[in-house]
Every structure is written in C-alpha cells, then in structure tokens.
Image (cartoon, rainbow, N blue to C red):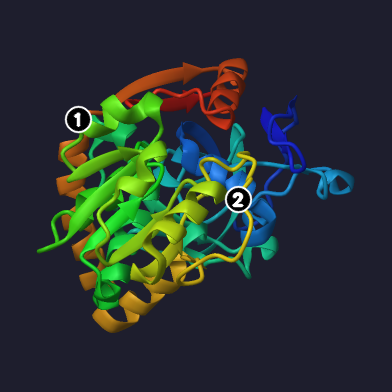
C-alpha cells in the first residue's frame, strides 16, 4: 500500500495498492513496521521541490512524478527478502522511508552499523538520508522507547544542528534565542539544548491554543503568544523560524530591527498561513539552515566518532526528559494514517501526542 500526496495541494491524497517487484542482485526488500508522523513531515512536503524531498521516493508511474509524491517518513523496518550477501532476512533497521508499506533498496556501502541505499535516483541526494542503521548495532536504540525514538530522533538531529550552528557562530553576539512554533517538537528539542548553554535566554512564540502546553515545558525561560511579540525585551536576539509564518517573521524583524543578530529559517509548520505584511524586512536576511552541511562540517572537524558521541549524549538526556511530556499514540491502517496526516496538515494535532503509525 502506498499513500501518495498531491504536490500542488497537500490536502489531497490517494491510496495505491501495488504488487511487490521481484528483486535484482544486490537488492533488499524492507517491510515498514512502524513510523512517526509529525509536523516535520509536513515540512518535507512543503519544501519537497525546493529541498529535493520528493526525489527520494518517486511514485511508480513515471507519468505522475511531476504531480504526485510519496512523503518521506522516519521509522523502523524489517528485512523481508534479501539478494545481498551482506544483509540478512530478519534484520531490523531504522531509517528514511516513503509513506508506504515497503521499500526496495540497492545495498551499497556496508559496515557493522548498517548499510546505504545506492539506487541511482538517490545518488546525488544527501547521504545521511540514504543510510539504514541496524538496531542491534545502534547505541542510540532502546526497544522499550521505540515510539519516542522514531518520533523524536529525526528532528532531534535538526535541533542538535540548530544549537550547534548557533554556538559555532558565537551566538551571533546575542544572548536571547526566539523560537517560533514553540510547541513543535523540533522547537522543543532546540530550546532544550540552547537552554543548557550558559547565559542564554530562550523565548518561545506560540499560538493561544498551545500557550498552556508550551508554558509548562521547562525548556523555555519565557513563552509569548504571537499577539504579544511587541512585548519582547529589546536585547540582542537570534530568531529561529520553525513556523514559517511570514507575518510573524515580519513582526519579529520590525520589533528587533538592527538588534536582531541573525534570522534562521528551519521549518514551515504554518505553511498555509496567508501573509498580509508588506515592505522591506528590517535586520538580517533570513537564511535557511540545511542541516547536512553543518553535520558534514562537524564530522570533518571532530571526526565521525566524536560527532556521534556528542549527539548520543545530548539525545539520551533529551529522550529521558521527553518521556515526561510526550504521549505515544498508535495509528493503525491506511485510512487512519491519512486522517492523522490531514490533521497535521490542518494544524489539528495536540502537541503532547506523538503518532506512531503502522499499515
């Protein structure tokens, strides 16, 4: 079963049943067991053409590739069939999958921790998304917290990069970090890490509906609703834009002016909001953070082993804390998966709930 999304209208979906294809030499069939659905996945759809997310898992019918796409998700899968001497049936992996029941990969580089998919259409895409980690060799894996793992780990890497990139640039001379869409899991993880930095004040911006939830999280020093942006203290600040709501960005820039030291674009959780503000944007030009670039920089500077140790330490601390506020909820079957996806698209999801899906 495949769930496909209209590239021109993320509200439009279709379900396609397709026969499994026979494997060629070197290929492996991964049957998707469970995967997470969060606002992070909606960002993949919104930025699908700009950032290449639709290219990872093109639909089967070549005539539909321009109009329909398979949304990427993160999850766990089991090796059902293998024509690779290096990958065995029954092995369990964590990685990047289409919104579908299975994925055939072409096994390339293999080491003790996992393997890479080297299928031709993924060859020019960031390597980090083409890697499948064997759970029995994964130091981050904890079977008892698998639901939290698949919901939070993919976005945690982005959040880790947000924190690291800002610290790597000496916080751009600012002591205040302002994060929009503060109830989003990417924002929460970034706030959790930034708040651990000495002399850094973390402010969350959120909707009225999510004020209570966000205010109760210990990762923010202060939380403001969007209609109170003009009440923020005028200290040097960095703006971390996870919401992608153009009017909010305009108001933050107008409020801080030259006091805004850096403006980072991360996500687009309010992708369908209509912008009404016009005029020149004051302060620094908003700049898109592309996590793989910073990750590659740190792996070169620190070495892969040190990089992974740093991520693992931060991850374990965040995961333990997240168990206190995030409730894992199962979603079963294609129809329920579509309904959950549409709730996410329409902003109808309780931020304290994480959806773990299975076909």
Name the residue furthest right.
63
Q: Secondary structure at mark 1?
A: loop
Residue 320 position, x and y percent, is: 15, 38
User: What's the residue at 67%, 27% (across, down)?
Assistant: 1
On screen, residue 46 versus residue 200, left or right, reads right
Q: CA distance from mark 2 to mark 1?
A: 31 Å
Position of 328 relative to 298 (above/below): above
Q: Residues within 10 Å of mark 2 (few under 14, many from 20)?
A: few
Residue at 64% from the left image edge and 41% from the top image edge? 274
Q: Earlier in the sequence, mark 2 or mark 1?
A: 1
On the rendered structure, is 24 left or right of 206?
right
Residue closer to the observer: 5 or 246: 246
Q: Position of residue 32 (x, y in %)?
A: 52, 35
| Residue 202 shows up from this direction | yes
Q: Quadrant of residue 224?
A: top left
Residue 244 or residue 341, whichever sits in front: 244
- Residue 17: horizontal and vertical position, in percent? 74, 26
* Residue 220 shows in this picture: no
Which residue is label 2 attached to?
A: 277
Q: Is residue 284 above or below residue 203?
A: below
Give the quarter of the image for residue 272.
top right
Relative image position of residue 172 (x, y in whole percent) = 30, 75
Question: SS at mark 2?
Answer: loop
For the C terminus, give its image quadrant. top right
- The residue under label 1 is 216
Callout 1: few (<14), some (14-19), or many (20+) C-alpha neighbours within 10 Å? few
Q: How many marks?
A: 2
Q: Residue at x 63, y 68 (%)?
A: 123
**In the image, what residue occupies the spot 59% across and 19% down?**
339
């Amino acid at each position: 079963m495949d769930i496909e999304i209209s590239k021109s209208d993320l509200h439009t979906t279709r379900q396609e049943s397709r026969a499994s294809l026979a494997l060629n030499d070197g290929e492996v069939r991964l049957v998707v067991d469970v995967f997470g659905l969060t606002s992070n996945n909606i960002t993949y759809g919104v930025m699908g053409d700009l950032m290449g997310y639709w290219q990872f898992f093109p639909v089967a019918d070549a005539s539909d590739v321009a109009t329909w796409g398979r949304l990427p998700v993160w999850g766990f899968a089991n090796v059902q069939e293998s024509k690779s001497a290096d990958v065995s049936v029954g092995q369990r992996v964590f990685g990047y999958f289409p919104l579908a029941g299975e994925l055939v990969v072409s096994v390339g580089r293999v080491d003790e921790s996992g393997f890479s998919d080297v299928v031709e259409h993924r060859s020019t895409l960031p390597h980090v998304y083409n890697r499948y980690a064997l759970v029995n060799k994964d130091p981050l894996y904890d079977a008892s917290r698998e639901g939290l793992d698949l919901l939070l780990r993919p976005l945690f890497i982005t959040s880790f990069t947000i924190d690291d990139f800002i610290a790597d640039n000496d916080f751009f001379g600012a002591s205040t970090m302002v994060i929009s869409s503060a109830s989003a899991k990417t924002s929460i993880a970034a706030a959790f890490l930034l708040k651990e930095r000495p002399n850094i004040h973390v402010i969350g911006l959120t909707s009225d509906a999510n004020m209570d939830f966000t205010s109760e999280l210990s990762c923010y020093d202060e939380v403001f609703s969007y209609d109170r942006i003009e009440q923020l203290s005028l200290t040097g600040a960095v703006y971390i834009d996870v919401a992608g709501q153009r009017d909010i960005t305009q108001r933050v820039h107008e409020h801080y002016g030259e006091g805004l030291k850096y403006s980072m674009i991360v996500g687009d959780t309010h992708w369908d909001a209509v912008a009404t503000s016009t005029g020149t944007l004051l302060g620094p030009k908003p700049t898109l953070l592309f996590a793989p670039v910073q990750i590659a920089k740190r792996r070169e500077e620190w070495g892969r082993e040190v990089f992974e140790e740093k991520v693992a330490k931060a991850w374990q601390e965040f995961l333990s804390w997240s168990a206190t506020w995030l409730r894992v909820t199962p979603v079963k079957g294609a129809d329920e998966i579509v309904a959950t996806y549409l709730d996410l698209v329409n902003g109808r999801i309780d931020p304290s709930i994480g959806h773990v899906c299975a076909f």
